[in-house]
Image (cartoon, grey):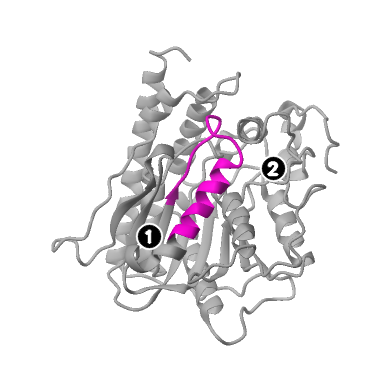
Amino acid sequence: MSLSQGYPFNSHDHEKTAKPRPTLPWTVRLCVSVVSAVIDTACRPNGTANRRLIHWLDYQTPPNPPTKVNNNSVSSIDVSLDSTRNLWFRLYSPPNPQLLPVLIFFHGGGFSFLSTASLGYDMLCRNFAFKLPAIIVSVNYRLAPEHRYPSQYDDGFDVVKFLDENGATVLPQNADLSRCFLAGDSAGANLAHHVAVRACKTELRKMKVIGLISLQPFFGGEERTQSEVDLVGPSSLLVSVPRTDWCWKAFLPKGSNRDHAAANVSGPNAEDISGLDFPATMVVVGGFDPLKDWQKRYYEWLRKSGKQAFLIEYPNMIHAFYIFPNLPEVSQLVMQIKNFIAKCSSSSKLLPYSKSGTLATASYHTSSPYQDSIKFHVGFFQLYGGLLICLLGLLLGFFYKM
């Protein structure tokens, strides 16, 4: 049973009935626990964010333009649209001469944290570019609370319009704008949805958005769902009700509540999309994500609106599991996305689906022992490097006024 609107949330009331923790490597659990602690410290009670602490935490990766040395790896360049609002994107090009789809990606972080250059998202987009393969456009947008709704949506859609008008000169020659996908994780998936709605209402000249990849989208409402009630306590969950409430308060217009259409897309103020040519949507849900009930409602709402929507569930995964490359589910997710892109791009029947509406499982591809070793060590150093940065940032943060 869901708690009624306005009911005070107390995690201690539900600790005895909370679900068991997910079985994750201790390295992942430790890293996420430290990140959770840093986020809680950075989120000030007055609704502002401690940017100085976040600066120490969030390691920014530089682009690596194509050279003779790295011509067999994914290259990246940064393209600026508007320096006055720090609007830019990082363009990832894989070493593949074939005509490739374009995937416009929006990073997560509760609308308030992280960037396109953050280590985890740089690695994720490189992985997508190489393994899908695809031309990846990773968008850096303005953050709350300094910039509230609809700043992030405006930035995202401005990138779409820019690519529609300038794609031929900015993107690689093998970029196929007739096969464009919007994608995002967490808050970025929320952003991708609203950008997709705007794109449906606009006559794009060259770009055709044929798919939406929604990784554990960040939606919410005044109601406390069962998953928000049950999945409390363990810091390894990364997402908690107090953290999401802080993010919504920092992002939404002042005076609005969480039933605003930006947050509760399927709620009382939902926009009617039944008449729009909305793209086929792949919704990814984690079994240990407190947001999973909102994500499933989103999937069900899309289907009720007459849109093609497909659900993929990872029962043992937490929020943002795809950031950790040493988890086997990450490779499975990449294969599911690759399958979705292939089916959307096909001129045959759009997508295979079961009676439950979930995507047909992608075939599992095993890599060589050498590739597995590389992936393990990259993930190992990423986790421990990120943990070290988190600890350093947390320590240095205490030298400054919170």
Residue 13 covered by magenta stretch: no
Task: Say whether disc 1 or disc 2 marks the residue closer to the N-terminus.
Answer: 2
- Residue 17 in the image: x percent, y percent? 76, 37
Q: Give the residue drawn at x 52%, y 78%.
A: 345
Image quarter (top left, top right, bottom left or bottom right) of the N terminus: top right
Looking at the picture, does residue 337 appear above or below residue 54? below
- Mark identifier at residue 19: 2
Q: Can the viewer see residue 7 in this picture? A: yes
As drawn, is 284 to the left or to the right of 373? right
Q: Give the residue drawn at x 77%, y 39%.
A: 224
| Span of residues in magenta | 139-162
Looking at the picture, does residue 374 appear above or below residue 291? below
Q: Quadrant of residue 358?
A: bottom right
Between residues 352 and 118, which one lies in front from this camera angle?
118
Looking at the picture, does residue 122 appear above or below residue 280? above
Q: Can the viewer see residue 313 in this picture? A: no
As measured in the structure, the alpha-carbon distance from the residue carrying label 1 to the one carrying label 2 is 32 Å
- Mark identifier at residue 127: 1
Q: Amino acid at mark 2?
A: Lys
- Mark identifier at residue 381: none
As drawn, is 369 to the left or to the right of 219? left
- Residue 36 in the image: x percent, y percent? 52, 32
Q: Quadrant of residue 376?
A: bottom left
- Residue 379 in the image: x percent, y percent? 36, 50
Q: Secondary structure at mark 1?
A: helix
* Callout 1–callout 2 Cβ contact below 8 Å: no
Q: Amino acid at mark 1?
A: Asn
Q: Give the residue drawn at x 19%, y 61%.
A: 70
Q: How many marks?
A: 2
Residue 149 covered by magenta stretch: yes
Q: Secondary structure at mark 2?
A: loop
